[in-house]
Amino acid sequence: METRKRSVVKAVVWQMIGLAVMTLIGLFMTGSMRVGGVMALVNTVVGLAMYLTYERVWTRISWGRVDVIPPR
């Protein structure tokens, strides 16, 4: 099971990568760094909230999880 802190760190790092990629895509699509940056920022905020929620929901689902009992 993951701690909440680990889930948050994973989500923040993933969103930083996404922010950079979306800024470049926005720049390419609009020709404006400002518009591309705003698009990327909105996407990052929404994406971070959704990812954290998604991760926390999946930590409560036992389907497909195998618990390994350590040897004595």
Image (cartoon, rainbow, N blue to C red):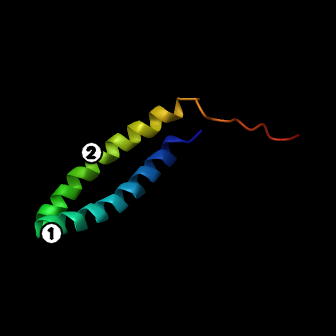
Which residue is at the front of the view, 71 or 64?
Answer: 64
- Tell me residue 40's x, y (percent): 22, 57
- Tell me residue 35's x, y (percent): 12, 62
Which residue is at the front of the view, 45 or 65?
Answer: 65
**What kind of residue is marked 2?**
Val
Above-or-below relation of 14 to 48: below
Which residue is at the front of the view, 54 or 13?
Answer: 54
- Tell me residue 31's x, y (percent): 11, 70
Residue at the (51%, 48%) spot, across then down: 6
Crowding at dot 2, Cα within 10 Å, few <14 / some 14-19 / many 20+, comes out as few
Q: Is residue 61 left or right of residue 55?
A: right
Instruction: Say which element carries label 1.
Output: helix
Q: Is residue 24 left or right of residue 5?
A: left
Residue designated by label 2 = 46
**What kind of residue is marked 1?**
Met
- The image shows a total of numbered marks equal to 2
